[in-house]
């Protein structure tokens, strides 16, 4: 479904990625791991069109998408849940969700159905639908971020550090949601600080070091790789 071929990207004179290649099969969960500054967020931002690539190619469902606008990429079926709580704090929960459906805004009936689906996944958001998003807890704001991304009806969901700042109980519930979404047919590329949990949840893993691919393989193999265990899993 998704294929990156030797992509390189930079921020001015600072090289962020160099020759990064990866694939995510349709209906699977893949994780992207690495230390802070390794290039994980940059990789997601290149896929979603936020950061242009300098060289290489990005393919989605057999179509090359690098160089296309963010809106075009969303319309292709890719949505991103960025790192942090990038919500509109003065707007209600419901209005934040409606913004996520911008590309489908003319189909008002389906947008209402999509909101109802988000509320089924996150009942807490239904309870707070008229509340200002800025008054939500950290966990509720993360629910809203995911829900808003789902409003574009993606086939591929890019998730950047979704467990950041959450309690262990909320992290466990969050990963239950991630597995549920995958079971509905959604393909997921997951950037996650909790390497152990990410590898347990995914089928395939990639590990970046200084903007380059250091390791990749089936998640079970990476979990048993001595070098990976020492460097990234703390064992």
Image (cartoon, rainbow, N blue to C red):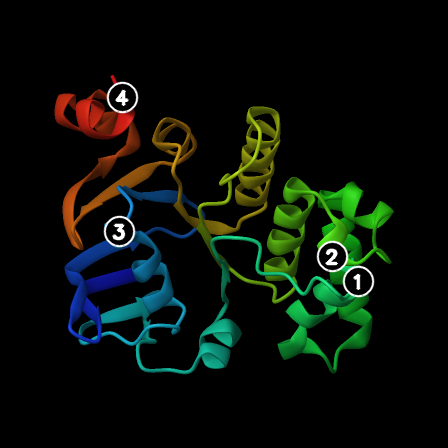
Mark 3 in CB contact with mark 4 (< 8 angstroms):
no
> Helix or strand or loop: what does disc 3 sit on?
loop
Residue at image location 73% in from the left, 48% down from the top: 136
- Residue beneath label 2, please? 133
Mark 1 crowd level (few <14, some 14–19, many ≥20, 10 Å Cα)? some
Mark 4 or mark 1, earlier in chain: 1
Q: Quadrant of the N terminus?
A: bottom left
Residue at image location 55% in from the left, 25% down from the top: 168
Mark 3 or mark 1, earlier in chain: 3
Is 61 rendered above or below residue 199? Answer: below
Residue placed most toward the observer, 85 or 118? 85
Is 101 rendered above or below residue 145? Answer: below
Residue at image location 30% in from the left, 39% down from the top: 204
Mark 3 or mark 4, earlier in chain: 3
> Which numbered tag is attached to residue 92?
1
> Helix or strand or loop: what does disc 4 sit on?
loop
Residue at image location 19% in from the left, 57% down from the top: 21
> Helix or strand or loop: what does disc 1 sit on?
loop
- Residue beneath label 4, please? 234
Q: Residue 120 appears at what percent x and percent y?
A: 77, 45
- Residue beneath label 3, please? 37
């Amino acid at each position: 479904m998704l294929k990156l071929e030797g992509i390189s990207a930079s921020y001015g004179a600072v090289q962020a990625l160099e020759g990064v290649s990866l694939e995510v099969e349709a209906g699977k969960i893949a994780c992207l791991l690495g230390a802070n500054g390794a290039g994980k967020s940059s990789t997601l931002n290149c896929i979603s069109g936020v950061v242009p690539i300098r060289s290489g190619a990005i393919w989605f469902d057999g179509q090359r998408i690098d160089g296309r606008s963010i809106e075009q990429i969303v319309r292709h079926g890719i949505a991103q849940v960025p790192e942090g709580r990038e919500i509109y704090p003065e707007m209600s929960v419901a209005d934040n969700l409606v913004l996520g459906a911008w590309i489908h805004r003319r189909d008002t009936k389906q947008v209402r159905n999509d909101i109802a689906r988000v509320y089924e996944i996150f009942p807490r958001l239904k309870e707070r639908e008229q509340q200002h998003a800025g008054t939500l807890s950290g966990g509720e704001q993360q629910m809203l971020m995911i829900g808003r991304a789902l409003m574009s009806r993606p086939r591929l969901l890019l998730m950047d550090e979704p467990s950041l700042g959450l309690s262990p109980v909320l992290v466990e519930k969050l990963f239950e949601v991630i597995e549920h979404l995958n079971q509905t047919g959604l393909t997921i590329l997951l950037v996650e600080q909790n390497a152990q949990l990410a590898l347990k949840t995914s089928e395939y893993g990639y590990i970046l070091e200084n903007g380059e691919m250091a390791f990749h393989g089936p998640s079970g193999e990476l979990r048993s790789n001595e070098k990976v265990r020492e460097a990234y899993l703390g064992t």
